[in-house]
Image (tube, rainbow, N blue to C red):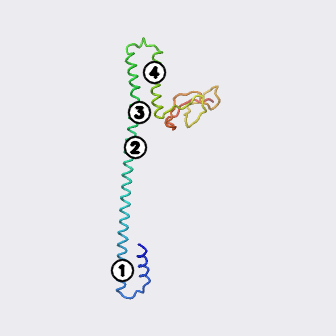
Amino acid sequence: MNDEEKHDFEYEENEEAGKPADLVEKIKKLKEQLKHCQAEKQEYLTGWQRCQADFVNYKRRQEEQLGEWLKMAEEKIIREILPVLDTLDSFVKSHAGHEDKMEKKHLAEGLAGVKKQLNHILSKNGIEEIKSVGEKFDPEFHEALEQVESDEPEGTVAEEVQKGYLMNGKVLRPAKVKVSK
């Protein structure tokens, strides 16, 4: 109801109810105002419903786009890992049937090269190892498996059972460790 309509309504309320024609006119105006308010209410409701539907559609599109980005990221990492697999295949083929002749040193060098390739790929993608041995035990980065006797000060990581990793500074997997007591 705008200011002019409020004024008309107040003016009509303050008039002396005299003639039935005046009363009929008042009712007529009130019905018009009510009709106008109902139309306005419906317009607002329709606008709100449209806005809500637009938001639901936007949210769905965002989720689909995020899914596509995740697929692209996975594909990128897999493409980077494939050459490492090729290196392993090549190494295995070149030494097939020669297990007895293959020296341990040669095997260790080949595997070290593969590990170096993998570490490079992981590093390029924001993944780094959590430092453990000799560090003060930190439950944010380490998972204690047991306490062991050690020359290290109490509460220091004495042994690493499984490496832990950070991805862009966030713990991807905590390191599983043995802590000195």
Seen in the picture, residue 55 relative to 23 is either above or below; the reply is above
Q: Which residue is mark 2?
A: 66
The circle drawn on residue 27 is 1
What amino acid is labelled 2 in the image?
Leu
What amino acid is labelled 1 in the image?
Ile
x%, y% of residue 40?
A: 37, 68
Tell me which numbered mark, 3 or 4, is placed earlier along the sequence. Answer: 3
Tell me which numbered mark, 4 or 2, is placed earlier along the sequence. Answer: 2
Q: Quadrant of residue 80?
A: top left
Q: CA distance from mark 4 to mark 2?
A: 36 Å
Q: Residue at x 39, y 26 (%)?
A: 83
Q: Which residue is mark 3?
A: 77
x%, y% of residue 25?
A: 35, 82
Q: Residue at x 37, y 84 (%)?
A: 23
Badge 3: how crowded within 10 Å, few (<14), some, or many (20+)? some
Question: Toward the viewer: 73 or 142?
Answer: 73
Q: Residue at x 55, y 37 (%)?
A: 140
Which is in the foreground here, disc 3 or disc 4? 3
Which is in the foreground here, disc 3 or disc 1? 3
Q: Tell me whether circle 4 and circle 2 mark residues in contact (CB < 8 Å).
A: no
Q: CA distance from mark 1 to mark 4?
A: 94 Å
Which secondary structure lies at badge 3? helix
Question: Toward the viewer: 160 or 71?
Answer: 71
Seen in the picture, residue 7 relative to 51 is either above or below; the reply is below
Lateral position of residue 25 relative to residue 148, left or right? left
What amino acid is labelled 4 in the image?
Leu
Q: CA distance from mark 2 to mark 1?
A: 58 Å
Which secondary structure lies at badge 4? helix
Badge 2: how crowded within 10 Å, few (<14), some, or many (20+)? few
Q: Which residue is mark 4?
A: 111
